[in-house]
Amino acid sequence: MENPKNHILVIFGASGDLTARKLLPAVFSLKVQKLLPEKFAILGVGRTLFSDIDFRKKMKESILKFSKEKNPDGKLIDDFTESVFYRSMDNATAGDYNGLKLKLEDIDKTLQTSGNYIFYMATPPVMYDVIAANLTHAGLTDQSSGFRRLIIEKPFGYDLNSGKELNRRLHEMVSEEQIYRIDHYLGKETVQNVLVTRFANGIFEPLWNRNYIHRVEITSAESIGVEERGGYYDSAGALRDMVQNHLLQMVGMTAMEPPSSLEPDAIRNEILKVFQSLQPISEADVTKQVIRGQYTGSTIRGECVTGYRNEKGVAPGSKTETFVAIKFFINNWRWGGVPFYIRTGKLLPTRVTEIVIHFKKSPHHLFQRENASLSSNQLIIRIQPDEGILLKFDMKEPGSGFNVKNVNMDFHYSDLANIRVPSAYERLLYDVMIGDSTLFSRDDEVETAWKFIQPIQTAWATNKNIKIYGYPAGTWGPSVSNDLIEGCGLTWRYPCKNLSDDGLYCEL
Ligand code: BG6
């Protein structure tokens, strides 16, 4: 593995949850694997007052609590946090950036970090261009004395226009090569494995098209609610929070053509082509192709679960969706006529993300089997948890006659001895450090994804007749979402049962 060049990682929003839960533990894992440069430092920036010592203590606690390393070594954490610094400042105040610059120069001099900086924006989205402008004004994005890279968290804008505007503003200050728009789903080992499964094996690709595939289903279910993020979530909703980015990227990986090489742009060009081929959903068709839902209070295993509208930070009559299911088509030679179904939701019965390829059924039924009208073949790529691949197919039930039974051919990553699956943030941070942008969204990809989402947002905002269905927490979302699936007797795949026995859905 390539060793990154010496640098300082500057994290804006350093006193927040993302830094504590994901970023610091991920960088610590890079340290354990000896993937950090020889001279390296982290500078946390935030409004909360901390001394370097206090911040190090807090980060040590976070690493102990959230690190993926088994039994993280306290001494190694201390060595690591010795190069962690903190600066309290207001990100919006341009004048504060001169002080930031001096602090960086100071660390550079003491630790010889070579004048290279990565700026990670783990802040509310409204701050992205403000921080970029202030950095630029202070001369901190100029690459004449070292590399300067900006990592931008999602959501990248909140609709098509704001996404475009953010790109335009950033391009006034830095080049596209300096921008790393992070989508942590692309950092997941199993999402990258979609490419390898498809393009390293000769057996899948010939079948991977409209001739053999009946439909494609992608689910990203969460068993948690909005927790402490009600304020952010209420203005985002599942469409912006999960679909515009994570789910569409999985669609891109599943549907793309083979790239000509593994160069960042070769892969991103193919994902872009998929986004450009998404058949637009007109505002009039939103009612037919999109279902939105919101979790309501319920009882799960005897425990009362709060409904979305009673969560902290959520408006009492909120119409924000915590569940969304969409049916759409990809207009190209490979996929013409094949329906794609995607769904995501909070407080569903379990946490599971999977891509299900439903193959067409055999043309003639020679053998007796249950549900002979349904296909017996599905390839299920389990993104998380229990990462792996499952192929469902029919085989003969032992004994007389030709009774057929559907069985699983199953691969679990966990069966691979001594394989450590890196966290998404670990992989992505390392990639920024070595300057590899393959797994980051490019400007045109983000805008094209917004273009697909925009009519849905507009229809929901303007057409008061579009229903939002309540679904009891712990169920698979509004059961009307099954009506999206074309074909007699077909439904979504349900990896487990509803947990709540409360009524299935109601209109809100
Ligand atoms: C984030 C969303 O991007 O992804 C969260 O903002 C969501 O709302 C999370 O919970 C899901 O990520 P993962 O990796 O747990 O599937």
Image: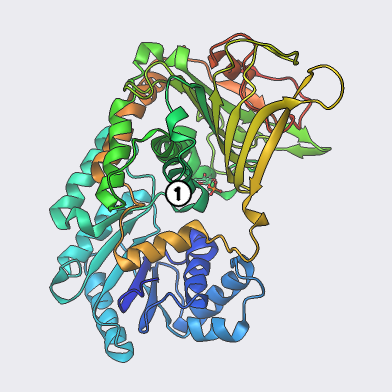
The image quadrant where one finds the C terminus is top right
Q: Which quarter of the figure has residue 437?
A: bottom left
Q: Position of residue 15 (x, y in %)?
A: 47, 66
The percent position of residue 346, horizontal first and vertical second, equals 59, 37
Residue 163: percent from left, percent from top: 27, 40
Q: Residue at x 54, y 19 (%)?
A: 360
Question: Which residue occupies the foreground of this view, 225 or 277?
Answer: 277
Rendered residue at 64%/43% (across/down)? 224
Is there any visible trace of residue 499 in the rendered image? yes
Quarter location, residue 7? bottom left
Q: Residue at x 52, y 61 (%)?
A: 422
How many labels, in total?
1
**Which residue is at 49% across, 36% downward?**
203
Say whether residue 430 is left or right of residue 221: left
Check disc 1 and give the amino acid type: Gln
Q: Judge by depth and name the residue closer to the eye, 334 or 152.
A: 334
> Which residue extends farthest right?
399
Residue 108 location, x and y as percent? 28, 84
The answer to whether residue 271 is left or right of residue 402 is left
Left or right, 173 with reference to 129 = left
Residue 397 lies in quadrant: top right
Compared to 136, does 269 lie above or below? above
**Residue at image mark 1:** 192
Is the residue marked by circle 1 packed among few (<14), some (14-19), or many (20+) residues within 10 Å?
Answer: some
